[in-house]
Image (spheres, helix red, strand yellow):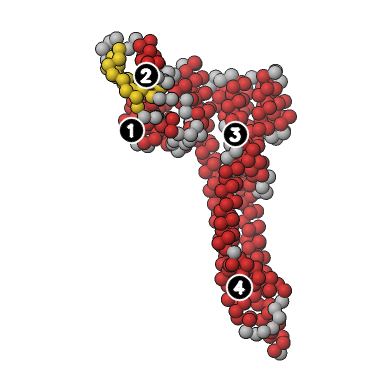
Amino acid sequence: MPTFLFRVGTPDGQILERRVESMTLDAAEDQIRRQGLHIFSARRTGRTLRDLMPRSGRIISTERFLLFNQELAALIRAGLPILQSLDLMLERQRAPRFRQVLTEIRDKVQSGVALSDAFAEYGSAFPAIYSTSLRAGERSGDVEGVIRRFLKYQKLLVTLRKRVTTALIYPTVLIILSFGMVFVMLTYVIPKFSEFYAGFGAELPFLTRFMIDLAFFIRENLLFAGISLLGVVIAVRSWSRTETGRRVLDGIKIRIPFVGGVLHRFSILQFAQSLSTLLDGGTPMVPSLEIAGQSVTNKMVASRLEGIVQRVREGEPLWRSLEETGVMSDLAVEMIKVGESTGSLVEMLGSVSEFYDEEIEASLTRAMSLIEPVILVVLGVAIAVLLYAFYLPLFQLTNVAQ
């Protein structure tokens, strides 16, 4: 939609700039006049960042967004109005994309749009839970409080995500180095041995011949294999961006030995923590469930949680709806059941989040203690087989010579 920039005068004598999105200039001018403003000039601007950016585009890192909200909460707590707080934040903002978006949000707030609606217009560029929490805070008059709760929620997820990533770095590097070592031996070392054995004119053992044939096959088809692998990667990435592909791949992820359990527990922690944050901020149960389900990054788990929204809307208890999905442990379901019956659901959901946080920590410890020996054993066996294939002909030739 085209954007028009107006220079307007207010009834109290101030001269301001206003951006209006409208199909035509006449419609934009009518919108300005209905606000009681006098138009000095008007011009059509280029498309805004929001027009150029995909709905799922990411305009700022999670860490920078956390810092922005920490500063915003501090300014609001100090008693500054939202508009003045945004002006101060703009003066200090260095990220160009986020600065442009924040300018548009400030202009919308200045024209009378609620802060939550201004952020919601950018779709999934910002977390859905953020704009919903802001809306609940605006209704209750506690915007600073809901921002604090959002910060607590985001910090927990960021910390946990970093912990999982850090724990997986060493096994990943070890696997890559293992494949690299085997690849070098197959493509460089074995062909050298084949030239050495060719001078003897003796028949080589089956294992040695198989390894030599495999090595020459890889060397002769390396370019084709590389192009094919690249094509498969591109095709899988494209397919994973579809709803069906994402769901299938996420279903495979949670079935991976060692790692799958951690990813599954992380998804449930996301759901429980999101639901707790929304309910604590004053959002009704059904919208909270819808947004909490959308906050789950694993689409397979999210699809199994979708059905609870309709059941709860029809009057079924939350704990029974979760029990029927089978995604939560019996202990977590019992905790939610107690929370519903005693009126302390928010506190119990927080306890469920802590429970899964501890479970993830324990699962990571167990997984890392098992993955590393398994990788080392597999690597050792692979190298042992290669070395056996290399030196077996030498042993046989030595026996023949003796």
Lower position in the chain sequence, tag 4 or tag 1: 1
SS label for mark 4: helix
- Residue type at the position of mark 4: Ile
Image quadrant containing the C terminus = bottom right
Name which quarter of the figure residue 296 lies in.
top right
Q: Nearer the viewer, residue 55 or 79?
A: 55
Tell me the mark number nearer the camera, choosing from 2 and 3.
Answer: 2
Q: Are marks 4 and 1 in contact (CB under 8 Å)?
A: no
Distance, label 2 to label 3, CA atoms, is: 42 Å
User: Seen in the image, is 386 located left or right of residue 53?
Assistant: right
Q: Please, is residue 107 above or below residue 388 in the view?
A: above
Residue at point 66%, 61% (across, down):
378
Residue topped by disc 2: 25
**Is the N terminus in the top left, top right, bottom left or bottom right quadrant?**
top left
Which residue is the site of mark 4?
A: 190
> Label 1 amino acid?
Arg
- Kindly indicate the quadrant of the structure image that contains residue 383: bottom right
The x and y percentages for residue 321 are: 71, 26
How dense is the environment of label 3, judged by Cα within 10 Å: few (below 14), some, or many (20 and up)?
Answer: many
Q: Earlier in the sequence, mark 3 or mark 1?
A: 1
Relative image position of residue 233 (x, y in whole percent)? 58, 50
Between 35 and 151, the one lying in front of the other is 35
Name which of mark 3 and mark 4 comes first in the sequence.
4
Residue occupying image coordinates x 61% and y 21%? 285
Whole-number angstrom distance, CA of label 2 to CA of label 4: 74 Å
Describe residue 89's horizontal placement relative to residue 245 as left or right. left
Residue 296, numbered circle: 3
- What separation in Å lies between label 2 and label 1 (alpha carbons)? 33 Å
Local SS, label 1? helix
Within-10-Å neighbours for mark 4: few <14, some 14–19, many 20+: many
Identified by mark 3, the residue type is Val
